């Protein structure tokens, strides 16, 4: 039988996902070994294999069918804009995509000034400013520690993920506008949804039942 392939996002998200999958009988103990450099893990008994990928690559593997199923944040799904089905909100990894900056940048936003926006999410930022706000801005792509940008004068504001808000607070920045809410999602390859209807369907059904049970 063909393996059903599941792509997980490296890091915290993968551990939370493994916890959930274990509860519906899909186990892969080998994957929890942090010292292992192995990339693919197989549960022969179930005919399932898992692999770990960088967040941004998970939708790519799923769109091309290299993975039937993927688990990643909604931020990545929106940013990558891949052709796939987003089927379940797992309810963890909750955070918000926001426009942030010093309090003073609020005025610049309000008056639709031509400002610079630093972000790891250029597509989300573009869509927000151009299509939703009809505001022309200059978007600057960065790869991390985005909060630095307004502090050193690279940009007036940033578009970034806010979870607890402590990174912003500790750096004298604040949320100026909220773009959308985020959490971990299950995505499915469009062909797998049909071809593997039985196995994918059962897995999704079990996951949904478990989530319903866990939500009071
Ligand atoms: C994310 C995000 C913020 C921070 C928000 O960064 O980009 O910097 O977490 O969390 P908080 O609201 O709880 O402070 P991450 O740690 O993923 O690293 P990065 O700077 O490389 O993006």
Image: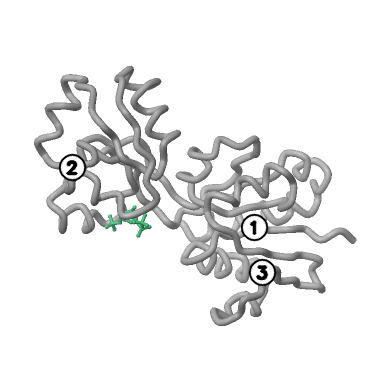
- Toward the viewer: 64 or 201? 64
Residue pictured at 34% horizontal, 45% vertical: 96
Quadrant of the snapshot with the N terminus: bottom right
Residue 105: x, y in percent?
A: 14, 34
Q: Is mark 2 within 8 Å of ligand 1?
A: no
Q: Is residue 89 left or right of residue 101?
A: right
Q: Is residue 65 above or below residue 19?
A: above
User: Mark 1: which secondary structure?
Assistant: strand
Circle 2 is placed at which residue position? 153
The residue drawn where x is 66% and y is 74% is 38
Residue that numbered label 3 is attached to: 39
Disc 1 residue: CB within 8 Å of ligand 1: no
Q: Quadrant of residue 170?
A: bottom left
User: Which x, y percent locates residue 29?
Assistant: 64, 79
Along the line of sight, the residue nearer the viewer: 111 or 12: 111
Name the mark nearer the viewer: 2 or 3.
Answer: 2
Q: Dividing the image into four equal quarters, which quarter contains ligand 1?
A: bottom left
Give the residue at mark 1: 7
Residue nearer the viewer, 99 or 114: 114
Query: Which residue is rendered at x = 36% and y = 50% of the image?
Result: 95
Q: CA distance from mark 2 to mark 3?
A: 40 Å
SS type, badge 3: loop
Total number of numbered labels? Answer: 3
């Amino acid at each position: 039988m063909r393996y059903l392939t599941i792509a997980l996002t490296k890091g915290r998200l993968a551990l939370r996902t493994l916890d959930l999958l274990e509860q519906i009988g899909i186990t892969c103990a080998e994957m929890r070994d942090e010292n292992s450099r192995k990339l693919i893990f197989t549960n022969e008994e179930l005919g399932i294999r898992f692999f770990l990928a960088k967040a941004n690559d998970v939708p790519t593997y799923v769109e091309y069918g290299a993975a039937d199923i993927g688990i990643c944040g909604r931020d990545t799904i929106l940013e990558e804009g891949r052709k796939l089905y987003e089927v379940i909100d797992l309810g963890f990894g909750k955070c918000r995509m926001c426009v942030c900056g010093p309090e003073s940048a609020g005025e610049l936003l309000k008056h639709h000034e031509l400002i610079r926006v630093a972000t790891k999410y250029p597509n989300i930022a573009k869509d927000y400013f151009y299509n939703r706000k009809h505001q022309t801005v200059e978007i600057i792509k960065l790869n991390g520690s985005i909060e630095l940008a307004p502090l050193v004068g690279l940009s007036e504001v940033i578009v970034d993920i806010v979870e607890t808000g402590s990174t912003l607070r500790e750096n004298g920045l604040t949320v100026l506008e909220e773009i959308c809410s985020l959490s971990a999602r299950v995505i499915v390859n469009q062909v797998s949804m049909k071809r593997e209807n039985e196995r994918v369907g059962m897995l999704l059904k079990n996951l949904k039942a478990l989530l319903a049970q866990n939500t009071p």
